[in-house]
Image (spheres, coloured by chain):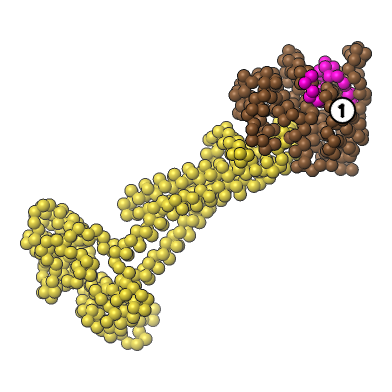
Chain colours: A yellow, B brown
């Protein structure tokens, strides 16, 4: 009851100077909105990334080509990863399954007058099975297509829709413009609607044989990466798979003992770890900015409370004459400071949420998620800032001499 | 005795000199009395009011209020005494702005941690005949009405004494008379009133006048015809009293109390 009345009193003093109060809380508003939007972005990307990784399965290994380093200098070719490497890994590494060589690039795809931009993926016949990605019409690419470097293509669901609408696509000839110029491809299959596999929207993808992609369309000598699975997501199996892959590749690439690898094998967990590290750096930067603006906000609150104490010296004197104890006066100003700051925090939450939503709709890539935890955290930080900043002014008010305060003009 | 004061002193240091605002005062006030403390500026009556009102502590001496040794209390205890036993009425009303009359009256109840505040506050407003203006804010009230709200606030806690400091000082004669009528009514209903004023006509409405000069009590007499005649013919309360007081208090703002 007493507390409630003090809150009402705080509200009354806000109503007296609304503009002044809003200006005073600006720092808190900005600080809180920074906290809220930063948390929304971090939380959004975190859940997005882990969702995407989840579609890959948890035992995924990535093999990248890398330049060999010798005495600190890069030596050799970047195109170190060959299709035969993928075949050898599949054949010889017992702890590795689902080997899928990949090369991809965005390209313009045309059928008659219709055209669309699609991600062209050159891969092997195992890709569909590995990702349990099924053909809706026709067939997937086959081993023979790869060996023969045949110009056949399997369309993603959306690509088919954009080029053919309702008409059947299988058997038609489309044109794909890659780095080596435009080539005709015969459509042999159309895939089901799937959404994302990893970080790619496979519905907007055209799959062609990896050999055709390398030699005839994109002009790459090597693979961009090889995807494969360890037999289980356990650390031992992943380490074992990595060891086997390294052994096979080092042998094939004729790397002598003591020389560094010309490739890189990374498990999904390591990616997540790297991603988390990056995110942590990002978070530290964002939270520091938020922290600084909260400190500035706190100074704003302290300033306005000092003004309020001076302005209301007479009132404080009257309240003391009426029997207000020093503790009551202290409490009143602390609550008022906390309350002002809390309201600023509320405004900041709205602003931060709005900023995050706006950012999401503007960029169309960034996914944000404003959690209730973030809101509660931001509001309590704001209130705490207010109370801490209110301590000195409140202490000053409570320390007034009633006689002097009553005499104050 | 509601008030029992013995050898009360209050000294301030101002630069090199010691100002003896109160220099050994003895005073007894009984329950139900209506007493006026009067004197020119600098006579010590404001200091007297602050001490009687428990807003300040004496340098030395004894002050008992309703049997309690107020002169030895700490800040917190003094606040409680002010809340329970003293009602204040000020020259400048000192209502809290932007707060309705009834909420202003309820302030002492609020600090007494009472949960029921509306009803007693309304009753107090009724006693000063202002219940119909209960939901108006001070800036919507006339000077006389504001002072009546302040009186209602002064009596809402049923205090042992109602301490009024120049209650008519900021009002015109007619309104001042109305306010004095309220004090008479309250006195008749048993409230002990201590009125601090430099206006002779106001002081004469009390039943007893204590005249002060230079921090001491000059005389302390019941108001009777003899006193009335004497005060209206001679001017024992001198001319300076007719001017408005510069600051409400004997001690200038920079003065600091001393402990002896």
Horizontal side of residue A63 vs B169, given as left or right? left
Q: Which residues are magenta?
A: B188-215
Image: A267 above or below A293: below
Q: Quadrant of the N terminus of chain A?
A: top right
Can residue A145 be seen here? yes
Q: Residue A59 or A17: which is nearer the viewer? A: A59
Q: Residue furthest bottom?
A: A257
- The quarter in which the C terminus of chain A is drawn is top right
On what subunit does the disc labeled 1 rest?
B
Q: Position of residue A33 (x, y in %)?
A: 46, 48
Q: Secondary structure at mark 1?
A: strand
How many marks the image carries: the answer is 1
**Image position of A161 (left or right of A317):** left
Residue at numbered disc 1: B29
Q: Position of residue A334 (x, y in %)?
A: 62, 44
Residue located 22% across and 81% down the image:
A91
User: In the displayed structure, would residue A382 be above or below residue A4?
Assistant: below
Residue furthest to the left in view is A171
At which x and y percent is residue B176? 74, 16
Q: Residue at x 27, y 72 (%)?
A: A227
């Amino acid at each position: 009851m007493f507390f409630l009345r003090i809150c009402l009193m705080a509200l009354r003093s806000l109503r007296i100077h609304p503009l002044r109060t809003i200006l005073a809380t600006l720092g808190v508003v900005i600080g809180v909105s920074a906290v809220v939007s930063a948390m929304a972005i971090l939380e959004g990307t975190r859940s997005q990334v882990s969702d995407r990784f989840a579609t890959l399965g948890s035992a995924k290994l990535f093999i990248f080509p890398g330049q060999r380093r010798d005495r600190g200098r890069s030596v050799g070719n970047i195109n170190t990863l060959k299709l035969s490497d993928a075949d050898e890994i599949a054949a010889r590494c017992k702890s590795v399954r689902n080997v899928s060589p990949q090369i991809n690039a965005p390209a313009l795809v045309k059928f008659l007058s219709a055209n669309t931009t699609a991600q062209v993926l050159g891969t092997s016949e195992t890709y569909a099975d590995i990702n349990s990605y099924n053909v809706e019409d026709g067939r997937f690419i086959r081993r023979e297509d790869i060996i023969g470097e045949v110009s056949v293509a399997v369309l993603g669901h959306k690509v088919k829709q954009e080029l053919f609408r309702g008409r059947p696509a299988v058997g038609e000839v489309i044109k794909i413009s890659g780095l080596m110029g435009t080539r005709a491809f015969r459509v042999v299959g159309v895939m089901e609607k799937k959404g994302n596999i990893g970080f790619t929207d496979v519905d907007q993808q055209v799959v062609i044989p990896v050999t055709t992609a390398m030699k005839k369309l994109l002009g790459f000598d090597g693979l961009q990466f090889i995807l494969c699975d360890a037999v289980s997501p356990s650390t031992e199996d992943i380490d074992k798979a990595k060891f086997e892959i390294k052994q096979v590749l080092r042998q094939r690439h004729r790397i002598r003992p003591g020389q560094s690898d010309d490739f890189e094998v990374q498990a999904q967990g390591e990616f997540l770890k790297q991603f988390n590290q990056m995110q942590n750096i990002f978070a530290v930067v964002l939270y520091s900015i938020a922290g600084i603006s909260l400190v500035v906000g706190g100074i704003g609150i302290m300033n306005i409370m000092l003004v309020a104490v001076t302005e209301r010296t007479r009132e404080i004197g009257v309240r003391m004459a009426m029997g207000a104890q020093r503790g009551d006066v202290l409490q009143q100003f602390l609550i008022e400071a906390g309350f002002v700051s809390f309201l600023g925090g509320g405004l900041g939450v709205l602003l931060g949420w709005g900023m995050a939503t706006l950012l999401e709709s503007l960029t169309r890539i960034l996914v944000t998620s404003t959690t209730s935890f973030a809101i509660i955290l931001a509001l309590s930080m704001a209130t705490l800032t207010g109370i801490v900043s209110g301590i000195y002014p409140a202490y000053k008010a409570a320390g007034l001499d009633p006689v002097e305060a009553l005499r104050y003009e | 005795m509601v008030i029992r004061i013995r050898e009360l002193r209050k000294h301030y240091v101002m630069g090199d000199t010691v100002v003896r605002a109160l220099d050994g005062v003895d005073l007894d006030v009984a329950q139900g009395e209506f007493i006026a403390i009067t004197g020119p500026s600098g006579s010590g009556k404001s200091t007297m009011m602050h001490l009687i009102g428990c807003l300040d502590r004496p340098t030395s001496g004894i002050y008992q209020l309703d049997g309690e040794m107020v002169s030895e209390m700490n800040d917190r205890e003094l606040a409680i005494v002010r809340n329970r036993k003293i009602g204040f009425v000020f020259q400048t009303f000192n209502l809290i702005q932007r707060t309705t009359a009834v909420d202003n009256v309820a302030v002492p109840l609020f600090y007494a941690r009472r949960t029921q505040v509306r009803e007693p506050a309304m009753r107090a407003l009724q006693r000063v005949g202002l219940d119909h203006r209960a939901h108006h804010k001070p800036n919507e009230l006339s000077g006389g009405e504001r002072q009546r709200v302040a009186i209602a606030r002064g009596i809402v806690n049923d205090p042992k004494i109602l301490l009024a400091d120049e209650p008519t000082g900021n009002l015109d004669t007619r309104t001042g008379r109305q306010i004095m009528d309220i004090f008479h009514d309250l006195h008749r209903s048993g409230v002990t009133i201590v009125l601090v004023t430099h206006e002779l006509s106001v002081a004469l409405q009390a039943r007893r006048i204590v005249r002060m000069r230079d921090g001491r009590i000059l005389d302390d007499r019941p108001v009777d015809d003899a006193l009335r005649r004497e005060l209206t013919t001679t001017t024992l309360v001198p001319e300076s009293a007719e001017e408005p007081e510069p600051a409400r208090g004997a001690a200038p703002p920079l003065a600091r109390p001393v402990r002896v």
